[in-house]
Image: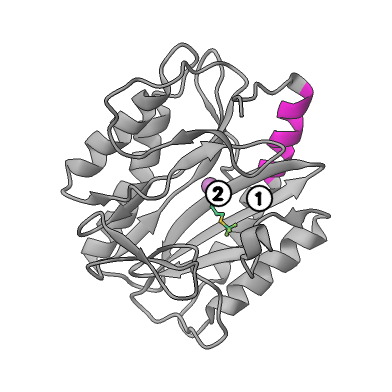
């Protein structure tokens, strides 16, 4: 599939889809507290998305059974919400959410601390977020796609963290996953040239230990092989001729 260049009208619809998703994330963040189940977060997010008149795009995507991916501690991504999984003080919890507004998809993820977390966990979350910002500095028309990957890799590697290689960022628009794929680790080639009107989901997934991940028997939950903590930070962005626009920031 070719990489799509969005028209001005499509960009407006992407902006609105992403603006609404930012609100969902804000509400979920404010609700997080020790004692809450991961299922409660999913119900909150799902309810908000539907109240906005939108559709949760993750629900039933390749049979994923929930609207919000909730991944705790060593879970990297795609954790399945569960009423028996209770958040504890000191946990870190990654929330990945997306919605469809008038046919246009948005996608964003954040990792939050539950109550007070260790300085090591806080650093992992901060660095993962900064990986995204290092990456999008490169997301300008005329630059190459893998300039983004290389910038993320250089920053994460400088902290000795493991960069997840089995999952990548992606184009986004009328589908949740469009071309191109966007690795978070350094590439030997330079990739396609970026053009104004591309909308991309850039999503570093960073492990405190080794990069290796495994899939649990539920077929979804991805965990670090060594049991180390993992963080995720994702925004949907618009490439322009100048500075990129981050569409899913609150
Ligand atoms: N944000 C993720 C992604 O970009 C989540 C989608 S997986 C789902 O691929 F199955 F849960 F929808
Ligand atoms: Co994504």
53 to the left or right of 100: right
Question: Who's the residue at 39% across and 45% down the image?
Answer: 204
Q: Main secondary structure of the magenta part?
A: helix
Q: Quadrant of the N terminus?
A: top right
**Which residue, given by chain and number where applicable, does mark 2 sit on?**
108
Report whether the residue tagged 2 is closer than 8 Å to ligand 1. Answer: yes
Residue 202 in view (yes/no): no
Would you say residue 16 sits in the magenta stretch?
A: yes
Q: Position of residue 196 (x, y in %)?
A: 58, 16
Marker disc for residue 21: 1
Question: Who's the residue at 25% across and 54% down the image?
Answer: 211
SS assignment at label 1: helix
Q: Are marks 2 and 1 in contact (CB under 8 Å)?
A: yes
Q: Residues within 10 Å of mark 2 (few under 14, many from 20)?
A: many
Q: Position of residue 219 (x, y in %)?
A: 49, 69
**Rounded to the nearest whole Å, what is the CA distance between mark 2 and mark 1?**
8 Å
Q: Residues within 10 Å of mark 1 (few under 14, many from 20)?
A: many
Question: Who's the residue at 52% across and 42% down the image?
Answer: 235
SS assignment at label 2: strand
Residue range (magenta): 9-19
151 to the left or right of 179: left
Counting residues from the N terminus, which is met first, the one under dot 2 or under dot 1?
A: 1
Residue 71 occupies which quadrant of the picture?
Answer: bottom left
Question: Who's the residue at 42% across and 30% down the image?
Answer: 136
167 to the left or right of 83: left
Does residue 170 sit above or below 107 in this rendering?
above
Q: Position of residue 154 (x, y in %)?
A: 23, 34
Front residue of 218 and 122: 218
């Amino acid at each position: 599939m070719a990489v799509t260049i969005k028209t001005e009208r499509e960009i407006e619809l992407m902006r609105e889809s992403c603006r609404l998703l930012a609100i969902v994330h804000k509400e979920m963040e404010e609700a997080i507290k020790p004692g809450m189940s991961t299922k409660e977060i999913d119900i909150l997010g799902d309810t908000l998305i539907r109240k906005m008149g939108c559709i949760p795009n993750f629900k039933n995507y390749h049979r994923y059974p929930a609207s919000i991916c909730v991944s705790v501690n060593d879970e990297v991504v795609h954790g399945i919400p569960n009423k028996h999984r209770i958040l504890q003080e000191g946990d870190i919890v990654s929330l990945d959410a997306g919605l469809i507004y008038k046919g246009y998809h948005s996608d964003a993820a954040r990792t939050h601390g539950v109550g007070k977390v260790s300085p090591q966990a806080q650093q992992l979350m901060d660095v993962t977020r900064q990986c995204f910002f290092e990456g999008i500095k490169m997301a300008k028309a005329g630059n190459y796609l893998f300039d983004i990957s290389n910038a993320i890799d250089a920053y994460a590697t400088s902290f000795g963290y493991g960069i997840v290689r089995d999952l990548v960022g992606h184009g986004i628009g009328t589908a949740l996953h469009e071309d191109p794929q966007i690795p978070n680790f350094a590439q030997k080639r330079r990739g396609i040239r970026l053009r104004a009107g591309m909308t991309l989901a850039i999503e570093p997934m960073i492990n405190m230990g080794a990069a290796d991940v495994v899939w649990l028997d539920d077929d979804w939950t991805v965990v670090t092989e060594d049991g180390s903590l993992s963080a995720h930070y994702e925004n949907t962005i618009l490439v322009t001729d100048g500075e990129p626009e981050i569409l899913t920031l609150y």
